[in-house]
Image: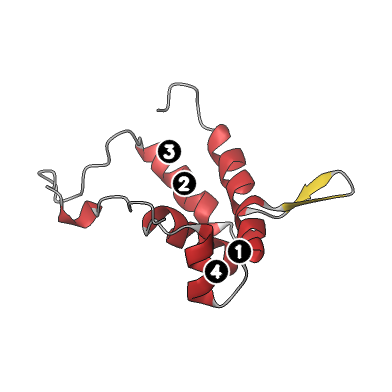
Amino acid sequence: MTRRPFSDPGSGPTTDEGELPRPGLTPDALAALHRALASLTPKQRLAVELHFFEGLSQGEIARRLGLTQQVIQKRLHGVIRRGRRIGGALPRLRAALARLPADTP
């Protein structure tokens, strides 16, 4: 089953300054998101982009990249070794975004 991708913000209206509106994201939150994405490995970033921005399932990403679904799951969620979570893009993104002020949506 394919998830529906996010709508393309490039096709929406712009502000008077020519920038795309970013509903729900303050400039600080947007900067934190960019920093969090930049902190990922290229393999993790690709998995995140395909999953969230293109709406692909883990299985679809695996088929597209010639990998197993388990590899994609580990890239997104990490793996627990000796009681500690190792790797995983989503825990890293959550941790980075959790440091935002409480009033940020």
Q: Which mark is residue 32?
A: none
Q: Residue at x 27, y 36 (%)?
A: 23
Q: Residues within 10 Å of mark 3 (few under 14, many from 20)?
A: some
Q: Is residue 50 left or right of residue 26?
A: right
Q: Residues within 10 Å of mark 1 (few under 14, many from 20)?
A: some
**Residue labelled with disc 1:** 69
Q: What colouring style does the render use? A: secondary structure
Q: Residue at x 25, y 50 (%)?
A: 7
**Is residue 41 among the parts visible in the rendering?**
no
**Residue contact at pointers 2 and 3, CB within 8 angstroms:** yes
Which residue type does callout 1 highlight?
Gln
**Residue contact at pointers 4 and 1, CB within 8 angstroms:** yes
Q: Residues within 10 Å of mark 4 (few under 14, many from 20)?
A: some
Which residue type does callout 3 highlight?
Ala
Judge whether 104 appears above or below 30 on screen: above
**Residue labelled with disc 2:** 33
Q: Is residue 11 left or right of residue 49?
A: left
Give the CA separation, mark 4 to mark 3: 30 Å
Q: In what quadrant of the picture does the N terminus appear?
A: bottom left
Judge whether 19 appears above or below 58 on screen: above
Give the CA separation, mark 2 to mark 3: 6 Å
Give the CA separation, mark 4 to mark 1: 5 Å
**Residue labelled with disc 3:** 29
Q: Which residue is most to the right?
A: 82
Q: Which mark is residue 62?
A: 4
Which residue type does callout 4 highlight?
Ala
* Label 4 element class: helix
Q: Earlier in the sequence, mark 4 or mark 2?
A: 2
Q: Residues within 10 Å of mark 2 (few under 14, many from 20)?
A: some
